[in-house]
Image (cartoon, helix red, strand yellow):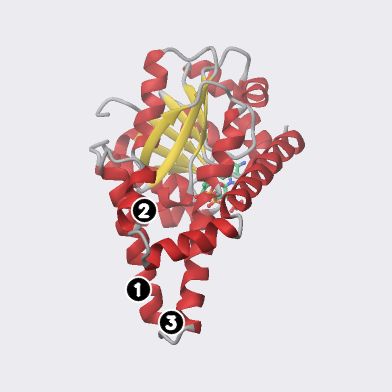
Amino acid sequence: MKHLRVGFIGAGNMASSIIGGLLEQGMPAENICASDPTPEAIERLRQLAPVGTTQDNAEAVNGADVVVLSVKPQVMAEAAASIREPLAASGAMAVSIAAGITLASLEAALGEGTPVVRCMPNTPALLREGAAALHANGACGPAQREIAEVILGAVGSVCWVPEESQIDTVTALSGSGPAYFFLFLEAMVDAAEELGLDRETSKQLAVQTALGSARMAAEGDIDLQELRRRVTSPGGTTERAIQSFEAAGLREIVSAAIRAAAERSRELAGELG
Ligand SMILES: NC(=O)c1ccc[n+]([C@@H]2O[C@H](COP(=O)([O-])OP(=O)(O)OC[C@H]3O[C@@H](n4cnc5c(N)ncnc54)[C@H](OP(=O)(O)O)[C@@H]3O)[C@@H](O)[C@H]2O)c1
């Protein structure tokens, strides 16, 4: 952590969040340099931390051990082309957090044999509560995989998927997942409001219930089905609600939605690739 030097290509929301996490974990600010063509993005980052900044992508790569590609997928080709030569000269590895950009297209743009890790993070990373899945190309060894874990681990939990194609499922599960929970919360709040509770109280109760339940699921080693069973007394209120969900086909609805999102992720990868 103390010796790792990190370059960021793109200094927007995700880069700022990862940089904040790395600094919190003890990385010296002088080990970080971020490039962005937009002066406002650079200024926002400078207000957050005294890291190196530049409008020249090549400068962010010079001296780096790892370069984080944190630009939108639509500009990845241009950004990757701008660092191809300095990256080859420095021997640094690359970590891409862009949705839909495959390892094959990254390697083609950055140079064959470049160690590259592709990640799918999610928006709670902005609060350091993200969930990211990673997949490395064949040029990455254990040391490079560890570096990728350090970078993404600064903003949440990380796990590896053995096949790159599984990134589409990850995108459908945890990438898009925050929106599913927001939708479910919206529906719960609307229902409570219809029953006469005021909206603010409904939201407070629903959101805290989600937080508490997520912590129970994350922190114990009790499986999800058993956690649900413990809240569901025979003949009680929860049982009646669960029966209503099951009768309406909740599992099929969720399965179809996640399949649709994974399919869209494959389509987008095809369009961007
Ligand atoms: N936000 C999330 O929670 C989240 C979750 C999962 C994955 N991701 C992925 O993370 C990546 C970054 O997302 P973000 O939300 O941080 O985007 P963002 O806030 O728009 O940041 C990207 C930054 O890159 C700059 N940029 C554009 N072209 C560039 C170039 N050629 N070289 C260097 N910098 C350039 C942009 O400037 P301009 O604004 O002037 O274009 C912008 O400041 C995306 O690929 C996204 O798919 C984000």
The residues tagged by marks 1 and 2 sit, at their Cα atoms, a distance apart of 19 Å
Q: Earlier in the sequence, mark 1 or mark 2?
A: 2
Point 61% across, 45% down: residue: 255
The N terminus: image quadrant: top left
> Is the CB of the residue bearing disc 3 within 8 angstroms of ligand 1?
no
> Is the CB of the residue bearing disc 2 within 8 angstroms of ligand 1?
no
Residue 124 position, x and y percent, is 42, 51
Q: Are marks 1 and 2 in contact (CB under 8 Å)?
A: no
Q: Give the residue type that dot 2 points to.
A: Leu
Asked if residue 185 is positioned above or below residue 6 in the image, the reply reads below
Q: Give the residue type that dot 1 points to.
A: Gln
Most distant residue in the right direction: 271
| Callout in the foreground (1, 2) | 1
The residue indicated by pointer 1 is 204
Q: Earlier in the sequence, mark 3 or mark 2?
A: 2
Q: Is residue 5 visible?
A: yes
Bin the neighbour count of mark 3 within 10 Å (Cα to Cα): few under 14, some 14-19, many 20 and up.
some
The residue indicated by pointer 3 is 199
Mark seen at residue 127: 2
Point 41% across, 21% down: residue: 145
Q: Earlier in the sequence, mark 1 or mark 3?
A: 3
